[in-house]
Amino acid sequence: MWKMIQKTETLDNQVDLESVRGENPMLTSFVPIKSEIVVAREQTLRGKICAKLGFAIVFTALMSPFIICDLHFALTDTSCIHQSFDKIDITMYSYLLTSAIFGIVFVSILNCTIMCVDIDKKNLKAESLGCSELCYCLLGWGLKLFGLSWSIVGFVIFWGYMDTSKCSKPVYNYLLAKFIIIIASIFIEVAKKRSKN
């Protein structure tokens, strides 16, 4: 039987078992030998993980300033954040705090999605949507809808009810810049949707 197994062929290369048999003859039947295909797949997998991790880090780096500033101004400002209004029960404090929590949840979910999605899938069609892709689409639309509606609430509070003359300069500048960036991103998203159709 040992004569029959002089050489074993793997997918791309031949392995000489005589050199391994000299050390321990029982080991030859249990030692797994990596082929070049397995090594290439491992390198491809490492590359995909690094690319996904890179995208997640870049996205987190882009979103974290807004989250940190929302938390900072919500927890430290005393000039105008706590103004209450007759017609609406939401203050800028609760808006900023909820916005920061929403940002943390959004970044976490998107980072998990980036790490879990298969970037090799091609020709993804509506009829071939699996459960994970369907959940991703529904969750994505839910997050976008909540983000849009919560941004509108912030616009109404800031430009409609809030006495911005009582705000300190950093708070006023941050809120104004944040709302302008949100409005610009909404218009860019709408323009992208129209260009696809």
Image (spheres, rainbow, N blue to C red):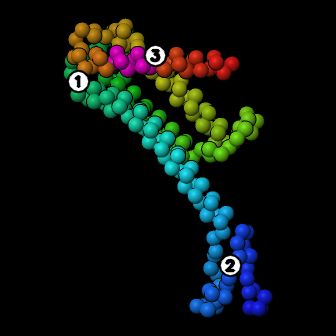
Name the residue at 36% across, 18% down. 177
Residue 15 appears in which quarter of the rendering?
bottom right
| Mark sitting earlier along the chain (3/2) | 2
Residue position for label 3: 183
Disc 2 on helix, strand or loop? strand
The span shown in magenta is: 175-184
Residue neighbourhood size for the residue with mark 2, other residues' Cα within 10 Å, grouped as few (<14), some (14–19), many (≥20): some
Residue neighbourhood size for the residue with mark 3, other residues' Cα within 10 Å, grouped as few (<14), some (14–19), many (≥20): some
**Rendered location of residue 28, percent (x, y):** 65, 85
- Whether pointer 2 and pointer 1 mark residues with C-beta atoms closer than 8 Å, the reply is no
The quadrant of the rendering that contains the N terminus is bottom right
| Three-letter amino acid code of the residue under disc 2 | Val
- Whether pointer 3 and pointer 1 mark residues with C-beta atoms closer than 8 Å, the reply is no
Residue position for label 2: 15
Name the residue at 21% across, 21% down. 78
| Mark sitting earlier along the chain (2/1) | 2
Q: Is residue 138 above or below residue 46?
A: above
Name the residue at 48% across, 20% down. 185
The quadrant of the rendering that contains the C terminus is top right
The answer, for residue 149, to whether it is visible in the render is no
Q: Is residue 62 above or below residue 3?
A: above
